[in-house]
Amino acid sequence: MAEIISLLGSTGSIGRQTLDICREQGIKVAALTAHSSIDLLERQAREFRPRLAVVYEMEPALELNRRLAGEGIEVAYGLDGLRRAASLAESDTVVTAVVGMAGLWPTMAAIESGKRVALANKETLVCAGELVMDAARRYGAEIIPVDSEHSAIFQCLQGSRDRGEIRRLILTCSGGPFFGLRREEAAQKTRADALRHPNWSMGEKITIDCATLMNKGLEFIEAIRLFRVSPGQVDVVIHRQSIIHSMVEFRDGAVLAQMGTPDMRLPIRYALTYPNRERSELPALDLLSCPPLTFAPPDLEAFPCLRLAMDCARVGGTSCAVLNGANEAAVELFRREEISFGRIPDLVEEALGQISVKSNPSMEDILEADGQARAAVTRSAGGGS
Ligand code: NDP
Ligand code: MG
């Protein structure tokens, strides 16, 4: 069970809910970090009294430093600041709730310091999963998933000591706000439409990824990395109610599922209290009043991002870094309303077609692939939306 944490990305959706669990469980906080949201970071710092508060951007960091003068809270900035937050001696656990590939360096710093990592930042595992998991083994750093599907699988695997017992992982998927639409219909949807998720309230990037189903694609790759299974052992099923968070089918045919009302505080709490389960005030799942549980195959024609991610999982090498980098760049353009929804999968597919894949990549290869993917999207998007 975590006693003192460093929380990277404390001002985001996962970060704020992690602090709810810290309040609930009396967990102390040694470091808080944000990109630039210093008003909220200041309030969090005054409440939790961390030793270190980090703002990625320098100007807002200087302003926060002025505001917290005399409070005994050190303020740092930039990547060095994030790395320090991830490796503070007093933290036993690092929660990685930064969004995007930017989470890679602090996650590696936490691993190299041998911390337990409560990992929300899935992009890191998608880009550099093999390097991250190898480093975790080398440094003896435990990785506990926060993503609800992977937490569900992790929970179902408690008590199973042999990975060979796993026949199949079944990732459930809400289907997002555009479930049931054809590709041409979804292509016309606006930013506001995409930000309306039926079951979860999350940061903007992941909410858009849920609308394209890229989120499920990233989770497909994340599952392969985390649980060391092959792409052929992972299935995705549409489950609109988000009550079953994912399942494991074992070789004897038994299928275990983890169920609950959709609330990220459950997987966050489990990641922080693991291997224990602690009391929560959340309303219990009422099976008699919940809607009928339904299951359907995903529509890979209407939602090509999921298909592209599954293909990359099979190809391996730097292809997942290209997929992720292109997606981050395309989603950013869509958030700024510079491209249409339908262009997101096109731009990712174009980037994948343009950049050659390196197998057994080093960290440099991955960073290069990420940079090439972002540049390819900028180039193609310039050609019209
Ligand atoms: P948010 O956008 O809500 O929060 C992101 C956090 O990261 C903020 O604290 C933000 O700071 C900080 N941040 C953003 N960019 C940078 C950067 N370049 N350098 C340093 N810090 C940065 O995201 P979510 O909380 O929704 O998601 C976080 C991660 O968790 C993602 O990888 C997502 O896929 C994953 N996840 C999220 C779930 C959810 O329910 N939200 C569910 C499962 C996984 P600032 O506020 O200053 O911008
Ligand atoms: Mg998820």
Image (cartoon, grey):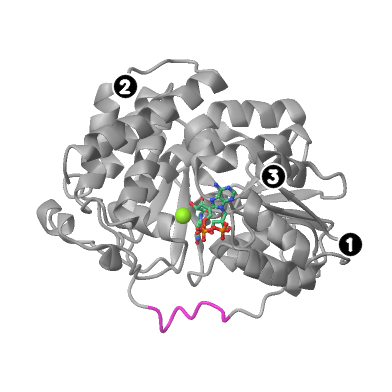
SS at mark 2? loop
Q: Earlier in the sequence, mark 1 or mark 3?
A: 1
Q: What is the C-alpha distance between the residues marked 1 and 3?
A: 19 Å
- The residue at 29%/52% (across/down) is 212
Left or right: 221 with respect to 179? right
* Disc 1 target residue: 72
Foreground tag (1 vs 3): 1
Q: Which residues are magenta?
A: 283-290
Residue 6 seen in this snapshot? yes
* Disc 2 target residue: 355
Q: Position of residue 228 (x, y in %)?
A: 53, 32
Q: Amino acid at mark 2?
A: Ile
* Disc 3 target residue: 82
**Extreme residue toward the bottom, this view:** 289
Q: Amino acid at mark 1?
A: Gly
Front one among 20 and 355: 355
- The residue at 78%/36% (across/down) is 114
SS at mark 3? helix
Q: Residues within 10 Å of mark 1 (few under 14, many from 20)?
A: few
- Queried on whether the Cβ of the residue with tag 3 lies below 8 angstroms from ligand 1, the answer reads yes
